[in-house]
Image (cartoon, rainbow, N blue to C red):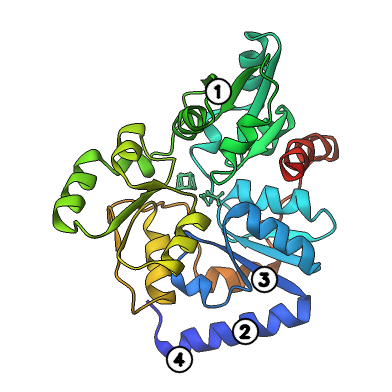
Amino acid sequence: MKDKKAITEIICKIERLKKEKDALILAHNYQPLEIHSVADLTGDSLQLAEQAAQAGAKMIVMCGVKFMGETVKLLNPDAKVLLSHQNAGCPMADMITGEQLREFKAQYPNNAVVCYVNSTVEVKAESDICCTSSNAVRVLQSIPEDKTILFVPDQNLGSYAAEKSNRKVVTWQGYCSIHQIITVEDVKIAREKYPDYTIVVHPECTPDVVKLADLAASTKGMADYVEQNDKVILGTEVGLYELMKSRFPEKKVLPLSEKAICPDMKRSSLPLLLEVLETESNEIIIDKDIAERALKPIAKMLEI
Ligand code: CIZ
Ligand code: SF4
């Protein structure tokens, strides 16, 4: 851990480089607080990619994981997009490859593939429409009734959205091992200890956890909920809880499980961010053909 003076110096250097290079720093809701302290924008992956497009910076550093950097690059093709850490990936996104998706599709004639935004650019390139955890229900409802809907990679979000939209869905068996840490037992204990709190969980949690909670919401949905309410228990990666505590110190907010920590999201740090800005490393480069195809399901989602 660096001392206060060293941290202030790093922050000053980051701020100077941001101006010099016309760089925008994006921080996902799960990022460490120190990253939020220098970020220009905070939010979920799609929100960040869209807002960055409006800002029109020459350089963008995505503090998050690889698929988020890819989404930013797809929506900001002219910017130089850098990732906060070269090895920050999302194990769930890597649970299906483009090749596996082609084989999955071949088994179901007349299909429509919905890919969660937590997917690789190769998987997006093979999909018909993208979704986030906030719009998955609406996306499923937009698909013609005669189609067999294939949902990749998250089985939990897929089955949650299927139930809410009353649509039949065949899900890929992917999952987020971090949200899997949150158990029914955690909900029961929280309910007993804090009966007057609202328990909001992420739809990446297992269906039994989602069923016992009061609400299911994306990280943006959770942040909006905390802004408008008090006494909230958040069932997601702890970064969001830490962000809410720092933003609303007077509010009563608790994590449903302190163990839900995503190591990939915690790879970023201020010294590393400075290094990335200085050396312009970890650039996200996407093959032109793949980028063109991967952008289509995102554009389709943005239309609805
Ligand atoms: O899309 C995102 O940013 C993720 C990973 C989760 C969420 O609910 O915001
Ligand atoms: Fe992927 Fe889960 Fe980490 Fe999000 S919390 S980046 S879904 S592994």
Q: CA distance from mark 4 to mark 3?
A: 20 Å
- First in sequence, mark 2 or 3: give its number: 2
Q: Nearer the viewer, mark 1 or mark 4?
A: 1
- Residue 5 disc label: 4
Three-letter amino acid code at disc 4? Lys
Q: Is residue 51 above or below residue 247?
A: above
What is the x, y in percent for residue 15?
64, 83
Residue 304 is left or right of residue 244, and the answer is: right
Q: Nearer the viewer, mark 1 or mark 2?
A: 1
Residue 254 is left or right of residue 114, and the answer is: left
Three-letter amino acid code at disc 1? Arg
Q: CA distance from mark 2 to mark 3?
A: 10 Å
- 248 or 236, nearer to the observer: 248
- Residue 266 disc label: none
- 213 or 282, nearer to the observer: 213
CA neighbours of label 4 inside 10 A, class few (<14), some (14 to 19), many (20+): few
